[in-house]
Image (spheres, grey):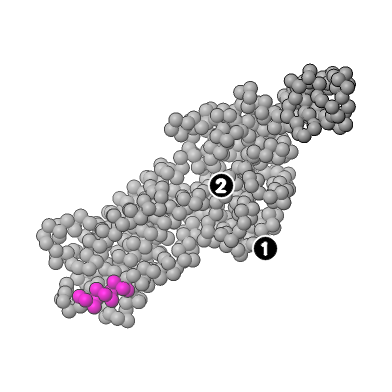
């Protein structure tokens, strides 16, 4: 499958800060890809290099095989970016904003697609409302719509659900999933790791401008060699299990175990101490555990 | 198709939507200048034979309003977009830096021309104006507003705060327009200041523009147009080079 995004040895420095220190990355066409990392890891800088907002000091970036510098017109036509900041132009209504954004891409008769995008993002009733009068969530929807007006084959969403309500989040993901099923490549950055786990087939993790993990979501989860046993006890947790304790709430204890065999040992220890288990649950590690693990090791 | 027509349309729509502020206010200011100065100076000063002072003043005021508003259009649009962050909407699409330049400068020309025409219309009932050479009027109006549109772009790109644009306007544009012969002919100045005025490009814009109305000027209009066109080429070249480099727009 040809690459929708191809990043080769990209470096970027802002003064003393090495924002990107040699990133190599390929995202095949049609993939739902996650780009994760703590604040300041370089995710937004990498997206900005792809979008032509930031010029790399070294290396190259391509979108649908178009170099973002040498063939910038084709590269930008192939890319839709939902920016992280909640920005808008206060002079215009929602429809004007989308018509204008569409016109920037040279599209004139684009009303049918704009109507469809507005419908899917539940913006139709706000079409003639000025941007200033919209709530934060509605402004976020318009930002998503703006990124989609030119039907780009590659869509980058930079923390699109930061500070938005559950309803929008669900509507947004339904729509983005549909676009992905229709063949659009999706790149997502988010701090909500459960979203990335549920949506992304493959994930890259960045730390201090370097790629520290790149694998399928399933493989990243497999890399976490532990599981959690959550127990609610009548009585005290035996002393020998205290070193395994990994958080917990009220009367419940969460134990971090290496293998399933350790479950048997933990239960035996509780029995020996005369404790009584009122509730018990085995919890598989999630992407958050994988993320913490990768960040700690790298 | 190119995104240029849409960016141009957006820039025009932007000032049109707030026309009370962008057209009405400068027309009122220019009218006040005309009525106060015209009333006080009429009969006391005669710059050209057969041209009353109020009539002499009108082209100067029209051009001053035109220049200041052309500058305000591109500079305020860019600085506001940079501060609010919505500049990203014009940086993400496949617009070339020449399209970017042309759209902002032409919208500034439209704003300058609209304000200039409105000032002219408001003053017409009170002043007997001549329009001897309309082609010179249009040529200087276009070049003057294009120069200030490009300068406004430079200010908007360079500035990081609104007060930096205001400084550019108050300490450079305003003195240069005021000292360019809006209210007087440079022949009424002492020799030193007359000589100095020849280094002010705005002087040639206003002098040539005035020639279009009365058929008389301090300088040959062809020479004025050559100076203004050269200045426009220099400012445009510099602005295009800045845009091409991505200075303060693309890191």
* In this view, A87 is above or below A63: below
Q: What residue range appears in magenta?
A: B31-41
Residue B218 drawn at (x, y percent) = 17, 65
Which residue is the site of mark 1? A125
Residue A29 seen anywhere in this rendered image of the structure: no
Residue at horizontal 55%, vertical 29%?
A208
SS state under label 1: helix
Residue B85's disc is none
Reply yes or no: does residue B35 show up in magenta. yes
Residue A8: quadrant of the picture: top right
- Membership of A118 in magenta stretch: no
Residue A225 image offset from top left, x and y in percent: 74, 22
Q: Main secondary structure of the magenta part?
A: helix
Q: Nearer the viewer, mark 1 or mark 2?
A: 2
SS type, badge 2: loop
Q: Is residue B249 left or right of residue A216?
A: left
Which residue is under mark 2?
A85
Which comes sooner in the sequence, label 1 or label 2? 2
């Amino acid at each position: 499958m040809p690459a929708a995004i191809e990043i080769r040895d990209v470096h970027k420095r802002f003064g003393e800060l090495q924002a990107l220190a040699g990133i190599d990355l390929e995202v095949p066409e049609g993939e739902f890809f996650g780009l994760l990392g703590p604040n300041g890891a370089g995710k937004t800088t990498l997206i900005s290099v792809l979008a032509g907002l930031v010029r790399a000091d070294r290396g190259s970036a391509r979108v649908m095989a178009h170099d973002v510098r040498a063939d910038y017109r084709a590269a930008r036509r192939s890319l839709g970016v939902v920016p992280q900041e909640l920005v808008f132009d206060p002079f215009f209504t929602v429809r004007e904003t989308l018509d204008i954004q569409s016109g920037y891409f040279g599209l004139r008769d684009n009303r049918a697609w704009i109507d469809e995008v507005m419908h899917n993002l539940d913006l139709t009733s706000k079409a003639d409302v000025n941007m200033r009068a919209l709530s934060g969530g509605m402004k976020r929807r318009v930002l998503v719509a703006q990124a989609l007006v030119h039907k780009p084959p590659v869509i980058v969403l930079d923390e699109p659900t930061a500070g938005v309500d559950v309803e929008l989040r669900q509507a947004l993901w339904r729509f983005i999933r549909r676009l992905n099923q229709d063949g659009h490549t999706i790149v997502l950055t988010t701090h909500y790791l459960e979203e990335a786990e549920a949506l992304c087939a493959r994930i890259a993790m960045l730390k201090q401008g370097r790629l520290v993990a790149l694998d399928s979501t399933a493989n990243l989860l497999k890399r976490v060699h532990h599981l959690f046993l959550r127990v609610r006890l009548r009585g005290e947790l035996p002393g020998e299990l205290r070193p395994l304790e990994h958080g917990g709430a009220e009367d419940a204890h969460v134990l971090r175990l290496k293998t399933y065999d350790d479950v048997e040992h933990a239960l035996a220890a509780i029995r020996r101490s005369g404790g009584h288990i009122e509730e018990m649950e085995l919890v598989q590690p999630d992407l958050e555990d994988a993320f913490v693990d990768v960040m700690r090791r790298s | 198709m190119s995104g240029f027509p849409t960016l141009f349309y957006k820039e025009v729509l932007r000032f049109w939507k707030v026309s009370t502020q962008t057209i009405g206010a400068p027309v009122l200011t220019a009218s006040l200048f005309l009525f106060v100065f015209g009333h006080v100076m009429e009969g006391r000063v005669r710059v050209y034979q057969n041209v009353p002072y109020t009539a002499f003043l009108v082209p100067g005021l029209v051009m001053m309003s035109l220049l200041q508003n052309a500058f305000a259009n591109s500079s305020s649009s860019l600085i506001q977009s940079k501060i609010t962050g919505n500049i990203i909407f014009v940086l993400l699409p496949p617009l070339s830096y020449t399209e970017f330049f042309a759209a902002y400068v032409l919208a500034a020309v439209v704003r300058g021309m609209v304000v200039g025409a409105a000032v002219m219309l408001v003053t017409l009932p009170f002043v007997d104006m001549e329009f001897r050479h309309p082609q010179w009027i249009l040529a200087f109006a276009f070049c003057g507003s294009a120069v200030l549109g490009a300068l406004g772009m430079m200010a908007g790109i360079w500035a990081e705060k609104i007060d930096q644009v205001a400084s550019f306007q108050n300490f450079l544009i305003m003195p240069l327009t005021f000292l360019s012969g809006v209210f007087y002919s440079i022949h009424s100045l002492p020799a030193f200041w007359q000589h100095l005025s020849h280094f002010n490009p705005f002087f040639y814009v206003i002098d040539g523009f005035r020639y279009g109305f009365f058929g008389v000027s301090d300088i040959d209009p062809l020479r004025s147009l050559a100076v203004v066109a050269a200045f426009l080429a220099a400012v445009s070249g510099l602005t295009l080079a800045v845009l091409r480099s991505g200075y303060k727009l693309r890191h």
